[in-house]
Structures are given as structure tokens and as C-alpha cells.
Amino acid sequence: MATIRLNINEKVLDKVLWLLGHFSSEEVEIVREDAEFLKNKKAVQDELDLMNQGKATFISVEELDQQVRQAIAKHGN
């Protein structure tokens, strides 16, 4: 599947969304770049930058398991 980014004038946005709505979700998925999306995108990019710079810290699967168990014990099931 290919991804494209469009800047659409508000005057025609409804028409474009109407047209895209005629495709199934397997054919076309609308990804809205709202504030939450952009915040998450920045967080992921920041983590990737740390990894590329060799500054990221990693934990083992065992350490992750221990942290998850501690969080569950602290906050309940």
C-alpha cells in the first residue's frame, strides 16, 4: 500500500472525504494528522533519533517482564 499526503482546501474537503468514503478500509485508510497524531509522530522520531545517535537505552525481555509484573502488582489486574 502506498501513502500520500495531501493539503486540501477546506472548501473541497467534504467532497474529497465523500469520494474516499466509497472505498473499503482495505483499499483506502484515512489517517488524520491531528494534534495527537503529530505529538506521537514527534515522540517516535525523537526515540529514533536517540537510537541513531547511540544514546538510547535498552532493556532485556526479562527486565521488561519484571517491570510489567511490578506495574500489575502496583495497579491491580
Image (tube, rainbow, N blue to C red):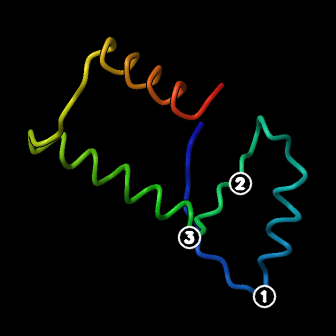
* 17 or 41, nearer to the observer: 41
Give the residue furthest to the top.
62
Residue 36, quarter of picture: bottom right
Secondary structure of the residue carrying tag 3 is helix
Q: Residue 52 location, x and y as percent? A: 15, 41
Q: At 32% across and 11% down in the image, what residue appears?
A: 62
Disc nearest the viewer among 3 and 2: 3
| Nearest to N terminus: mark 2 or mark 1 | 1
Check if mark 2's residue and mark 1's residue have beta carbons within 8 Å: no
- Where 69 falls versus 27 (above or below)? above
Residue 67 x/y as whole percent: 38, 25
As displayed, is residue 72 above or below residue 24? above
Is 50 positioned to the left or the right of 65 in the image?
left
Q: CA distance from mark 2 to mark 1?
A: 18 Å
Residue 61 appears left or right of 18: left
Q: Earlier in the sequence, mark 3 or mark 2?
A: 2
Question: On the rendered structure, is 37 left or right of 42?
Answer: right
* Distance Cα–Cα, label 3 vs label 1: 21 Å
In this view, which residue lies farthest toward the bottom? 11
- Determine which of the numbered discs, if any, sits on residue 11 in the image: 1
- Mark 2 against mark 1, which lies toward the viewer? 2
Question: Which image quarter holds the C terminus?
Answer: top right
Which amino acid lies under the numbered mark 3 shown in the image of this protein? Answer: Ala
For label 2, the residue is 30
Q: Which residue is mark 3?
A: 35
Residue at 54%, 26% (x, y): give it.
Answer: 72
| Left or right position of 53 against 19 | left
